[in-house]
Image (spheres, helix red, strand yellow):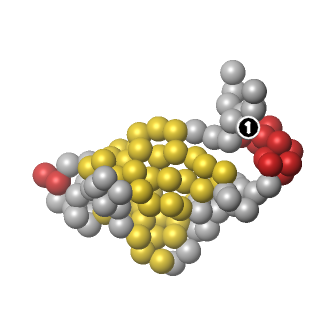
């Protein structure tokens, strides 16, 4: 059994008018895959100064170790932005490195 648990998966909702301040992930060993489920207009993700937009039914890969912000500047009746986020190992991280780093991503049991 491979015990490389890496991280998390979950649904993220962001309501109209919401802005999540600048932040960055703890490491560049993972990528975050965002699958757009509900993506109203005027929702934006800015990563490393580059604006990105979600699209319904499409995936957006994000290295969240870069400074990023999230906003939903749509009107109140636009509804929430909803994505499924899944953490993945960065493809440049070798198997031996994954095992050495596994403790960082093991969920609390």
Q: Nearer the viewer, residue 24 or 18?
A: 24
The residue most toward the front is 1
Where residue 78 sits: x, y (%)?
17, 54
Measuring 50% from the left and 53% from the top, which residue is drawn there? 33
Q: Nearer the viewer, residue 97 or 17?
A: 97
Image side of residue 80 versus residue 64, left or right: left
The residue most toward the top is 109
Image side of residue 9 versus residue 12, left or right: right
Where residue 15 sits: x, y (%)?
29, 49
Q: Quadrant of the C terminus?
A: top right
The residue most toward the bottom is 49
Where residue 72 sits: x, y (%)?
31, 60
Residue identifier under label 1 = 4
Measuring 52% from the left and 45% from the top, which residue is drawn there? 86
Q: Secondary structure at mark 1?
A: loop
The reply to whether residue 14 is visible in this rendering is no
Q: Is residue 8 above or below residue 40?
A: above
Q: Quadrant of the N terminus?
A: top right
Q: Nearer the viewer, residue 49 or 103?
A: 103
Measuring 35% from the left and 61% from the top, which residue is drawn there? 54
Image side of residue 66 versus residue 81, left or right: right
Measuring 55% from the left and 54% from the top, which residue is drawn there? 32
| Crowd around label 1: few <14 · some 14–19 · many ≥20 (10 Å) | some
Image side of residue 14 versus residue 88, left or right: left
Number of marks: 1
Where residue 93 sits: x, y (%)?
76, 57
The reply to whether residue 92 is visible in this rendering is yes
């Amino acid at each position: 059994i491979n015990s490389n648990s890496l991280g998390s998966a979950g649904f993220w909702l962001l309501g109209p008018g919401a802005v999540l301040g600048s932040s960055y992930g703890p490491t560049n060993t993972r990528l975050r895959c965002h699958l757009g489920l509900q993506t109203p207009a005027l929702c934006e993700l800015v990563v490393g100064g580059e604006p990105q937009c979600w699209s319904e039914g499409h995936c957006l890969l994000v290295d969240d170790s870069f400074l990023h912000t999230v906003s939903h500047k749509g009107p109140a009746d636009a509804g929430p932005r909803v994505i499924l986020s899944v953490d993945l190992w960065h493809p440049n991280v070798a198997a031996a490195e994954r095992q050495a780093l596994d403790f960082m991503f093991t969920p609390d049991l």
